[in-house]
Amino acid sequence: MRYKGIGSPGAAAAVHHLVINGGHDIMTPKELAIQLLRLINERDPQSAITLFAPEAELCFPRHAPRTVYRGSVELREFFDWLVANLPMQTVAADRVHESANSATVEFETAGTSERGHDFDSIGALVIDTGDGLIQAVRLYVDTEDLARVLEVAC
């Protein structure tokens, strides 16, 4: 099942929140995953970072400035790098599997890199959550194709 409309103006309304103490929103792992993809598609790094716990980490396979990003400052570095290098990227979730503290997203991504290379690929995100925030993200993509798109040596 593809989650249509991720990144569209009405997509935010489709994400349901459970309001608890103090009016803070707590999202399920599936809701966090869908919201993260929506914010990536909207090129909104600042809002994407708010989905993460303060010491969360993101593991990117290769070819980014680093393979592990920890904490808000480094997560911002990653999202800025992503927007700069893949300015015309769209991510569509094909399937989201949820458990109590994680979500796995099978996705398709397509677009054009900053260097003018078209891409159309699939991948997976494994998102660990806790206290309604993302604690860790691991991204699985074809690193050979990523090297081609970014023009880096494998």
Image (cartoon, rainbow, N blue to C red):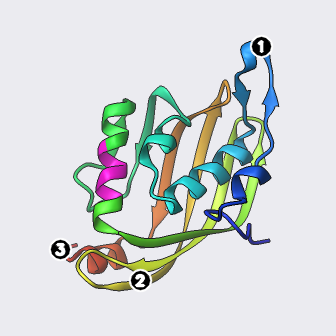
> As drawn, is 76 to the left or to the right of 137?
left
Q: Position of residue 71 (x, y in %)?
A: 38, 30
Quadrant location of the N terminus in the rendered image: bottom right
Label 1 packing within 10 angstroms: few (<14), some (14-19), many (20+):
few
Q: CA distance from mark 3 to mark 1?
A: 50 Å
- Which structural element holds mark 3? loop
The disc at residue 119 is 2
Comparing 92 with 11, the one in front is: 11
Type of amino acid under label 2: Phe
Q: Main secondary structure of the magenta part?
A: helix
* In this view, the mark in front (3 or 1): 1
The residue at the point 37 percent across, 50 percent down is 79
Residue indicated by mark 1 = 21
Label 2 packing within 10 angstroms: few (<14), some (14-19), many (20+):
some
Comparing 69 with 14, the one in front is: 14
The residue at the point 45 percent across, 58 percent down is 43
Q: CA distance from mark 1 to mark 2?
A: 44 Å
> As drawn, is 153 to the left or to the right of 104?
left
In magenta, the rendered stretch is: 77-82
The disc at residue 153 is 3
